[in-house]
Amino acid sequence: MKIFNSIIVYLFIIVIFNISYISSYTSDIDPESKKTVISNLRYIRTLHVQDYNGPEVKNPKLSIVIPIYNGEDYVVPLVCSIQLQTLKEIEILFVDDHSEDSTYDKILDAQEKESRIRVIRNKKNRGIMYSRMYGALQTKGKYVTFIDSDDLYINSNVLENAYNTAVAKKLDLIQYEYVGSTFDGDETYDYLLAYLSKAKYNEIVRKPNVKYLLFGQKDSPGGSGIVYDKLYSRKVITNMADFLGEDLIHIHLIFMEDFLISFAAFRSAENYMLMKSFGVWHWNKNPN
């Protein structure tokens, strides 16, 4: 019965997925911001993983969960972009979904220099839904965020600003915006668009309106159905797992995982705020 109920929830979310498009829109980035983003991306690609010389992080403020499968080419750039973050009291948790290439070895190589890295390796391929949620439940941070293995942080202080704001305002969910692009070997960009929420900047939305954010209903502004543009409180992570249930988390979903997790997050949160900042560059290049 539980698995039946989980499938019904999943199908329901697929049916209403198109409604979520009213929650966000794309826009060209202003020339100066575009120049900065491209410059930062190219700089990150010149870097190598550095030795972490800071204090041991026993009680991280933020945990970054990275599900990864056959992403050997993405480990180093992503870790480098994390090392540039001004928030240092973090843990970096890779969940290797039983990769068939050298991904796991690349993570271990990075871990030798970056002691804040932890790694979990699934005994078999379980899918991104399982890897994200299982990883999140193993973390220690007061807040949790997700990032895809083929994405990069493009703003060095976005996590610190988001964390400090979340703590000061006692937020369950805080969102920043992201830039979408493709990238080729000539370092040119097929497109570079800002993905913007219709929510008002710096306005705290509280229950009961939070649960309508994903669909822009009940006169509530829209929130994003993307997973990697938010910080989640520990309470929300726990509630998300309870809502989704083990049956659904263990289903090897091939699409809609982001939206399903976001649905659970907005349903579980007491409040939400959108921060005005581009935080993540969504590469969307890894076919795995």
Image: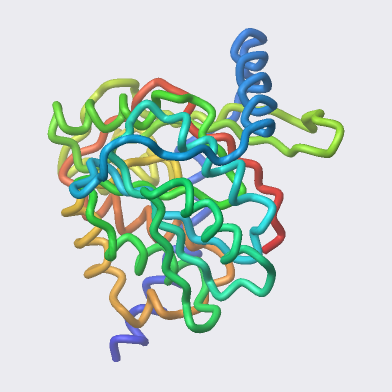
Give percent across and percent down for residue 190: 79, 32
Q: Is residue 218 above or below residue 121?
A: above
For the point 44% across and 46% down, which residue is it? 114
**Residue 127 in picture, x, y percent from top left:** 52, 72
Residue sitting farthest toward the top? 32
Q: Is residue 161 visible?
A: yes
In front here: 226 or 22? 226
- Left or right for 40, reference 21: right
Q: Position of residue 195 (x, y in %)?
A: 55, 32
Q: Quadrant of residue 180?
A: top right
Where residue 286 sits: x, y (%)? 69, 55
Quadrant in which the C terminus is drawn: bottom right
Task: Say which residue appears at 77% left-offset and 30% top-offset.
Answer: 189
The N terminus: image quadrant: bottom left
State how many labels appear. Answer: 0
- 286 to the left or right of 267: right
Residue found at x 69% / y 26%:
42
Q: Residue furthest right?
A: 186
Residue at 47 percent of width and 73 percent of height: 121
Q: Nearer the viewer, residue 144 or 25?
A: 144
Question: Is any atom of residue 226 visible in this view?
Answer: no
* Visual colour scheme: rainbow
Above or below residue 212? Residue 260 is: below
